[in-house]
Image: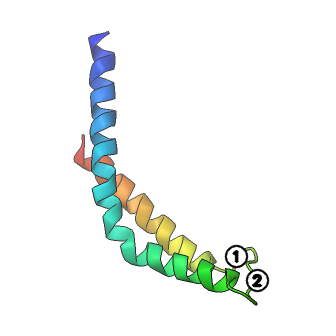
Amino acid sequence: MSGNGAVWGRVRGRLRAFPESLAACGAEAAAYGRCVRASTAPGGRLVKDLCAQEFEALRSCFAAAAKKTLRGSL
């Protein structure tokens, strides 16, 4: 059972470090938010894939942050 506690300890450590890693994605998050906001403004129309480029940049940044967080906790 003590092995299970070690696993949860590592998971908690990763979760605590994750917000700091995601902070590096602020520019991508802002760009995606601006795109969505502009397309939902009066007269705008949000359609599928309208902000795909911004979303992909944000997703890539999140994935890199998650990988970095995971690597740092091993």
55 vs 72, left or right, is right
Judge whether 48 appears above or below 65 on screen. below
Secondary structure at badge 2 equals loop
Judge whether 62 appears above or below 34 on screen. above
Between 31 and 4, the residue placed more toward the observer is 31
Q: Residue furthest front?
A: 42
The residue lying at 35 percent from left, 61 percent from top is 22
Write down the quadrant of residue 64 in the picture: bottom left
41 vs 24, left or right, is right
For mark 2, does the 10 Å Cα neighbourhood hold few (<14), some (14 to 19), or many (20 or more) residues?
A: few
Residue that numbered label 1 is attached to:
49
Type of amino acid under label 2: Arg
The residue lying at 24 percent from left, 42 percent from top is 73
Q: Residue furthest bottom?
A: 43
Between 56 and 36, the residue placed more toward the observer is 36
Mark closer to the observer (1, 2): 2
Q: Quadrant of the N terminus?
A: top left
43 vs 10, left or right, is right
Tell me the number on the disc at residue 45.
Answer: 2
Q: Residue 60: x, y in percent?
A: 46, 67
Write down the quadrant of residue 24 in the picture: bottom left
Type of amino acid under label 1: Asp
